[in-house]
Image: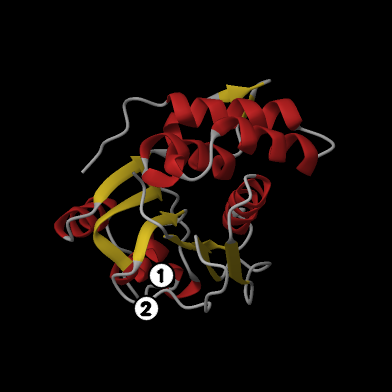
Amino acid sequence: MPPSTFDIYFVGVGGQGVLTIGEIITEAAFARGLPVNFYPTKGMAQRGGFVKAQLRMGRSTSGPSIPEKGADLVIATEVSESVKALRFLKTDGDFVLYGHVWEPAAVMLGKAPYPAVDAVQAAIRGSGARLHYIDPASLPQFGGVTVPDNVYTLGVALAATRLRDWIDAPTVEQVIQTRWQRGIERNLFALRAGMQCVEMPVG
């Protein structure tokens, strides 16, 4: 039996659509009659800056702040930003990491190092979390174009983590069909491909 509450912490950079993942989950939870609160932070969303959001399910009312070691699931869509979320994840939580690399100005100017992907993965595994790593090079194509990475990442999270105890694929597909007027088939393909991914390293 799933727990009575479920908290998700999102991190990424502006333009990746990480907030869209949270919005789709929120709409799917509403469609299933679940209490859900979504708190996005969009400060640098349009400029490739740090973006975070918090989603809390199972409570009629809740504050916007997930405490440290309080998140059941982290969804991170950029390697260096993912490190900022690790302290919020429960020891037995799930960490979905899409391995996109976006070098901030300080790194490009040689003023700061960029964390090695292997080191970030090791830190996540070392925390006791279950790591679900997505290699950007592994994404399939639809109509000759790589599928939307955010929707693919959502598919992985839905299939590989306890998120599946709260929302199901048919409901998410309904949300996708009503959310976009164009690109519906492409996004549905991305979701299903993410769910069918079976060679994802799990820590």
Left or right: 116, with 160 as reference point: left
- Tell which residue pokes out farthest to the right in this image: 181
Q: In this rendering, does residue 15 appear at all? A: yes
Q: Residue at x 36, y 71 (%)?
A: 84
For disc 2, the neighbor class at 10 Å (few under 14, some 14 to 19, many from 20) is few
Q: Quadrant of the N terminus?
A: top left
**Residue at mark 2:** 111
Question: Is residue 143 placed above or below 130 in the rendered structure?
Answer: above
Q: Amino acid at mark 1?
A: Val
Q: Secondary structure at mark 2?
A: loop
* Residues tagged 1 and 2 counted as in contact (Cβ below 8 A): yes
Q: Residue at x 23, y 50 (%)?
A: 118
Which of the two residues, 149 or 95, is positioned nearer the viewer here? 95
Q: Secondary structure at mark 1?
A: helix
Question: Is residue 106 placed above or below 76 in the rendered structure?
Answer: below
**Residue at mark 1:** 107
Question: Is residue 22 placed above or below 38 in the rendered structure?
Answer: above
Question: Is residue 19 placed above or below 1 in the rendered structure?
Answer: below
Q: Amino acid at mark 2?
A: Lys
Q: Residue at x 41, y 70 (%)?
A: 107
For disc 1, the neighbor class at 10 Å (few under 14, some 14 to 19, many from 20) is few
Point out residue 69 in the picture as x, y percentages from the top left corner: 28, 70
Name the image colouring: secondary structure
- Tell which residue pokes out farthest to the top in this image: 143
Query: Hey, which quadrant is residue 198 in on the image?
Result: top left
Which of the two residues, 53 or 113, is positioned nearer the viewer here? 53
